Image: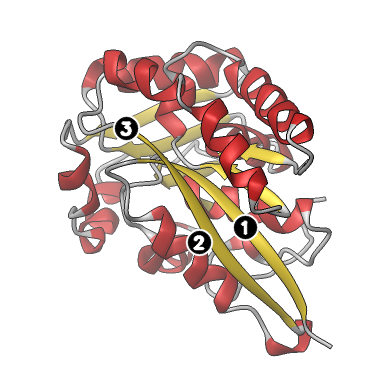
């Protein structure tokens, strides 16, 4: 008998990548698991990736959580990493708690994972103290993100800021360029490589290739979020070809 799961996603209105990469990963799981997933989104208005727009966007997240709980989702993912990190260190914990409470108040209680929280916790599971990353954001927002990581005890030892403020343009960035961009980063002392620290910047097709090339755990905001979606559903966290983070239950 096939188990059916409803995955809710709270996404910026201009986001398109998370709603393609997460379903692609979950639909690629071995048939032996006998499961199926449906995906249900609620949107927060955001077009330009600026601190001001991100703050206004985040204010809409509670309504989105309530709307998704109407559909009785089994798990909800807040799919905007910088939207959380721009609100200050540790905000993922506050956001996850208040959004979960909204689902409970609406009679459709569901665990809530933020992409920011998922990324932070993935680094903790990997015991990664030094990381390198690629981000599409403007330099100022990347510095905000680095401060967020540093607050958790993680040092960003090298990074590349692509400085692309238009969120739709971020979705059109060619993920085939990520390997060459990563080659220019100093990965010698790194414990992990975050190939895309943004759920809107495509990277799924490059994750495994980068891991094979650099010999490091390589993941993205999307793969970290997928891990936690599966974990909250008490399912195996195995997704073929999506890097070590989704290699099974090896991070527990």
Residue 148 visible here:
yes
* Disc 2 secondary structure class: helix
- Callout 1: helix, strand or loop? strand
Q: CA distance from mark 3 to mark 2?
A: 21 Å
Residue at coordinates 84% horizontally, 59% vertically from top-left?
A: 234
Residue nearest the observer in this picture, 210 or 168:
168
Label 1–label 2 contact, CB within 8 A: yes
Closer to viewer: mark 1 or mark 2: 1
Which residue is tagged 3?
Answer: 45
Which label sits on residue 22? 2
Assess disc 3: are there few (<14), some (14-19) or many (≥20) residues with their C-alpha within 10 Å of its C-alpha.
some
Determine crowd level at label 1: few under 14, some 14-19, many 20+ residues with C-alpha closer than 10 A.
many
Q: Nearer the viewer, residue 145 or 96?
A: 96
3 or 1: tag closer to the N-terminus: 1
Which quadrant is home to the N terminus? bottom right
Residue 129 lies, in percent from the top left, at 61, 29
Q: CA distance from mark 1 to mark 2?
A: 10 Å
* Residue 216 visible in the current orientation: no
Q: Does 107 sit above or below residue 217?
A: above
The picture places residue 187, in percent across and down from the top left corner, at 41, 42
Query: Along the polypeptide, which appears first: circle 1 or circle 2?
Result: 1
Query: Quick one: label 3 or label 2, which is nearer the N terminus?
Result: 2
Please tell me which residue lies in front, 104 or 7: 104
Q: Residue at x 16, y 36 (%)?
A: 166
What x and y, as percent, mark residue 126?
Answer: 68, 43
Residue 5 rendering spot, x and y as whole percentages? 71, 66
Q: Nearer the viewer, mark 3 or mark 2?
A: 3
Q: Is residue 82 above or below residue 191?
A: above
Tell me: 186 left or right of 1: left
Determine which of the numbered discs, if any, sits on residue 7 in the image: 1
The answer to whether residue 52 is left or right of residue 62 is left
Q: What separation in Å lies between label 3 and label 1 (alpha carbons)? A: 20 Å
């Amino acid at each position: 008998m096939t188990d059916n799961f409803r995955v809710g996603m709270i996404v910026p209105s201009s986001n398109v990548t998370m709603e393609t990469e997460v379903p692609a990963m979950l639909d690629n799981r071995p048939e032996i698991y006998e499961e199926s997933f449906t995906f249900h989104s609620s949107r927060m208005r955001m077009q330009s990736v600026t601190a001001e727009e991100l703050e206004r966007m985040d204010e809409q997240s509670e309504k989105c959580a309530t709307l998704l709980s109407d559909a009785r989702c089994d798990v909800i993912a807040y799919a905007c990493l910088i939207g959380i990190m721009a609100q200050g260190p540790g905000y993922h914990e506050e956001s996850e708690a208040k959004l979960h409470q909204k689902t409970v108040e609406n009679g459709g209680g569901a665990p809530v994972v933020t992409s920011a929280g998922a990324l932070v916790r993935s680094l903790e599971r990997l015991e990664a103290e030094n990381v390198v990353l690629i981000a599409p954001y403007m330099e100022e927002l990347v510095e905000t993100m680095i401060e967020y990581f540093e607050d958790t005890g993680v040092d960003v030892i090298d990074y590349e800021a692509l400085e692309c403020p238009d969120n739709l343009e971020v979705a059109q960035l060619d993920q085939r360029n990520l390997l060459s961009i990563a080659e220019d980063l100093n990965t010698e002392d790194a414990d992990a490589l975050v190939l895309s620290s943004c759920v809107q910047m495509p990277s799924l097709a490059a994750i495994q290739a980068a891991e094979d090339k650099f010999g490091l755990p390589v993941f993205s905001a999307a793969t970290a979020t997928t891990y936690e979606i599966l974990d909250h559903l008490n399912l195996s966290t195995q997704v073929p070809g999506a890097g070590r983070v989704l290699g099974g239950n090896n991070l527990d």
